[in-house]
Image (cartoon, grey):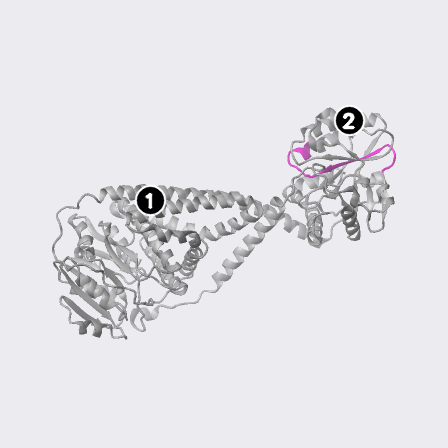
Amino acid sequence: MSKNRRRSPRGRHSSMRNVPLRTHWLLLTVLVVTLSGALLLQGYAHHMFDATPDGAAPRTDPASAAAVPEEIRSGGPVIEGAAGRTARPAPHTIALTFDDGPDPRWTPKILDVLRRHQAHATFFTVGAQVSAHPELARRIVAEGHQIGVHTFTHTDLGAASDWRRSLELHETQLAIAGATGITTPLLRPPYSSTNDALGDVDWHTAVRAGQEGYLTVLTTQDSEDWRRPGVAEILARSTPRGADGQVLLMHDAGGDRSQTVAALEQLLPNLKAAGFRFATVSDAVGLPSAAPPATSVDRWQGLALINVLRASDWFLGALSWLLWAAGALSVLRAVAVFVAARRHVRTRRRPWGRQITEPVSVIVPAYNESAGIETAVRSLLASDHPVEIIVVDDGSTDGTADLVESLHLPRVRVIRQQNAGKPAALNTGIRAASYDLLVMVDGDTVFEPDAVRMIVQPFAHRRVGAVSGNAKVVNRGGLLGRWQHIEYVVGFNLDRRLFDLAECMPTVPGAVGAFRREALLRVGGVSDTTLAEDTDLTMALCRDGWRVVYEERAIAWTEAPASLGALWKQRYRWCYGTLQAMWKHRGALTQRGQAGKLGRRGLLYLLMFQVLLPLLAPVVDVMAVFGLVFLDPVRILGLWGAFLLLQVLMGLYAFRLDGERPGALWSLPLQQFVYRQLMYLVVIQSVFTAIAGSRLRWQRMERYGSLRIPAAPAGPGA
C-alpha cells in the first residue's frame, strides 16, 4: 500500500470532501448491542439450563428445616405459601404431572397416550422449552390439560438469588402467555419433592412465590422415571398403595422417555380399573379455574420473547456455519500461503535471465519530508547499481527542496511543482526520467545498498512490467511497532509470494517498487482517481497484460505509524483506496489472460480475506465472549489457542524466510486484543465510507526521524 502524504488546498483535490460519518457507527453499535443481547438471552435460555435430573442430587439438609411450619410439613402437596395453607387431592384422584417439557419428541407421544385414555394431566413446563416449541404448549392447553411453571432454565430456586428467581418466573409466564394466551398460578420448583422434604430455603421460596401469586405444587408419589429403571419399576412406583389421592411426578423431557410412555400406556387403564380418576392439579384439589387469560401486554411481550429466542436460535445456527466456514477458509489460506511460499523460494533460486546492469531512474515524490529526505536520498546514492535520483517536491512548505539542493549531491535532481498530489508528482518524475527502468520510492524510505540492483533483475523477463520490493518496518521498538513489523513480514510478504505465483499481484507498494517505463506509458501513467494510487496502478498493469512479481531480496526500510491515531488514518486510507481500486477494476473478473488472473484470483482473494472476513470479525469476538460465558470455556480457549498456534507457526516460517529474528512474535497473542480490532474497524469504516459515497483528503503521515542509512561499502554507483 502507498503512503500518500498530500494535502490539496486547490486543484482537483479541492473537490474532495471529508464527510464525518456518524450514522454508521451508531448503526454498528446498535447491531453489536442487539447481537449481544440476543446471544445473551439465547445463552441464558439454553446454556444456563440446569440439566441435572430431579432427585439426582438432593440439596436440602433435613436438619435445616426449622423454619418450616409443622402444618406445612404434614399438609397437602399444593401450598399457598403466603397464607401458610395447603390442599391435597380428593380420594381416588390422581393428579398426573409431567415436568421439564415440552419436548418435541416425547411430549406429543405422551399427549397421544392421554388422549387415547381420555385422561388429563398438568404439565410443568420450562420457559426455554416453551419458547422453542410454542406449538406444543398450545396443544397441551387445547386438549384440556393444565400448564404450570417449572422456571425458565430449570434452575434451583432455593439456591438462586432473588433477582434471578423473579426473572425465572416472570420470563416463563411471558413465554406461556405468548404461546397459549393464558397465565398460570401453578409453580413446581425444580428438584422439589414431598412436603416432609422441605427445608428452610424451600419454604422461603414457597413463601416468596406465594407473595407473587403462585401456588407451589409438590408431589406425593414419584415414579422416578428419570432414572429409567424399566417399565415395570416405573409402574410399581406410580401405583398408589391405598385410596388416598396422589400428585404423581413423571417427566416428558430431559432425556429418553420411552419407558415413561410405555409405562403410562399401562398405568392409565390399570388405575382406572382400580377406581381412580385422573385430573389436573386444580381439579384434583378443588381449585377454581387456574388458567386466567393473559393481558394484551403480557401476550405481546411473550410473543416477542418467543420470536427473539427463535430468531436467535436461527441466527446462532447460521452464525455457527459461517464461523466454521471462516475457520476453514483461514486454515485453507494458511496452507495455501505456506505451500506458495515454499514454491516461491524454490522458484526464485533460478535467475530471471541476463543480469540487468543499465542505469535506473529513481523517482522520489516528496511533500514536507524534511525530517527524512536526506537519509532517503543518501541511501539511494549508496546503491551498488548506477542510478539517477529525481526528487519531485510537491509544493512542500518545510523547505524539503531547499534541503536537498543544499546537499549538492551528484546524480540528484530536484523538480519543484505546485501541490497537486502524489500521482501528479510521480507522473512528473516519469516524464523527467532519463532511463527505461524506474524505481519509485517514498520520501521516508531508506534502501539497502543492493536493493535497486535486486529489484530490477526480474526485468530480464520481457513480460515483467513491475516489481514489488520488500518493505520492512524500522521503528519496531514498541508494541505497536512490533505488531506492524509482524504484519509486514507475515501478512504482506507471505501474501505477495502467493500473488506472485498466482500471477495476480494487486499492489506494488509505494515505498519500494520498480516499473518498466513502457508499461507505465501504456496505461497512461499514475492515475489520481483513487487514494491507493499504487494499487490502482498495479491493477492497471495486470489488466494491460503485464506480469507483476515480488523480489524479497530488494529490502527497503520505512517508518510505520507510532500511534493508534496515525495508524488508523493510514490504514483507513489504504483500505478505502483499495476498495476504490477493486471497484474500478471489477471488469477484470470477466476478462481473459493476465487481466482475468487478477480478477478471478487477486480481486476475489482481496474481497474474501481483506473485506468479508474482517467484516465478520466483530461477530467472532462477540461469539468468543459468548462461548466463554455460556459454553465450555476450556474448549473455546483451546480453539483460540489452536488458531494462535497456527499464526505463530506461520510467523516463525515467514520470519525465517525474511531472515528476521522471531523475538517479536512474543507479542502476537496481545495483537489479538487491540491491533486486530483496530484493523477490522478500519475495514468497517472504509466499507461504510464507500457505500455513502464520501471522499477522503490526501493526508500526510507524521515522521519520527528514526531512519538511518544502512552501513555498506560504496558500490559501482558511488
- Residue lying at 73% horizontally and 32% vertically, measured from the top left: 224
Q: Using residue 596 as the reference point, say whether residue 386 is left or right of it.
A: left
Quadrant of the snapshot with the N terminus:
bottom left
Is residue 677 highlighted in magenta? no
Label 2 sits on a secondary structure element that is helix
Q: Using residue 91 as the reference point, say whether residue 16 is left or right of it.
A: left
Dot 1 corresponds to which residue? 337
Type of amino acid under label 1: Val
Is residue 95 highlighted in magenta? yes
Report if residue 522 is visible in the image.
Answer: no
- Residue lying at 43% horizontally and 47% vertically, measured from the top left: 644
Dot 2 corresponds to which residue? 236
Q: Using residue 323 as the reference point, say whether residue 247 is left or right of it.
A: right
Type of amino acid under label 2: Ala
Label 1 sits on a secondary structure element that is helix
Check contact, mark 2 vs mark 1: CB within 8 A. Answer: no
